[in-house]
Amino acid sequence: MHQPFNGNCPRSVGKDAKYSIKRDFSQGKWVVQLVYRLSHAEKALLATDDHPKLVGMVNNVKDDVVGQPGGAFYINEYCQVIVPALDAYYCAGKYDQLLTFDFEGDAISSRPPARLAPGDPWPGPHVGIPYVLSAGAKDIRFERRRGQRILTELLSLHTSGSQARKLANRLSRVKGSDGGRIYINEQREFFAPVIVADGLEYRYLGALGDDPWFSESFSD
């Protein structure tokens, strides 16, 4: 029996912020699917059948908990495969193989292109684990549930106040001092929606690198 995951479980995110397992009836096989957003008004539906092990990991949880395969999942910054099923989230194990999707001859993945610098438009998928950069760039946080309780986890309590401020300040140079939602993907790369003249645009914030981060698991 799979155990519920008690770390950062993405909630209230768009379809382009998650992967999914779908049945490709034309080929008779399961595929990993990605909603790749090109702009506010344009998106593409991409898929790859190169990851049968990952498909099996996700479908195993879905079969066990829901009773049928297929559906959404995430891969966090520790390469843990997080699967929402019914009212809970489960860890299906770890998967560190890079997911690459073909879009008009270009390889799309969570790995940033060479020479991409913080502040540049983020060209990769929007799939990632959401955190919140605090106003004033003093800390980073997320909320997790324990029964009926909602717990706020602060980076400053997992590292130190000075280390949390250092990373938060670096990310705020692109995100802005008002803070807000940021994402980190399975390659440990940060990106975030940033307000621009004509709305929101996803920008690259840089890699986590050697900066201290949250724990991989939590004890309740």
Image (spheres, helix red, strand yellow):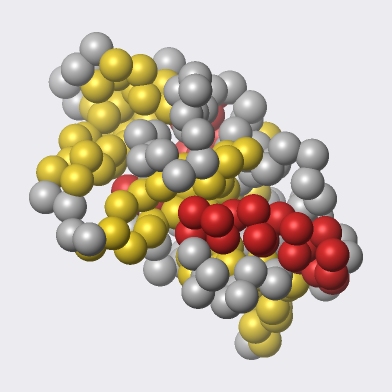
Q: Nearer the viewer, residue 56 or 134?
A: 134
Picture mark count: 0
The quadrant where residue 119 appears = top left
Relative to the observer, which residue lies in front, 36 or 193? 193
**Where does residue 118 sit, x and y in percent of width and height?**
51, 41
On the image, the x and y values in percent for residue 180 come to 49, 70
- Taking the image as shown, residue 161 lies to the left or right of residue 46, namely right
Tell me the residue at 70%/72% (across/down): 138
Relative to 216, is 81 on the left or the right?
Answer: left
Residue drawn at x 64%, y 49% is 91
Q: Is residue 53 above or below residue 39?
A: above
The reply to whether residue 93 is visible in this rendering is: no
Residue 186 picture location, percent across and down: 58, 38
Q: Position of residue 193 (x, y in %)?
A: 38, 57
The relative height of residue 78 versus residue 24 in the rendered view (above or below) is below
Q: In front here: 188 or 94?
A: 188
Residue at image position (64%, 87%) is 148
Q: Quadrant of residue 146?
A: bottom right
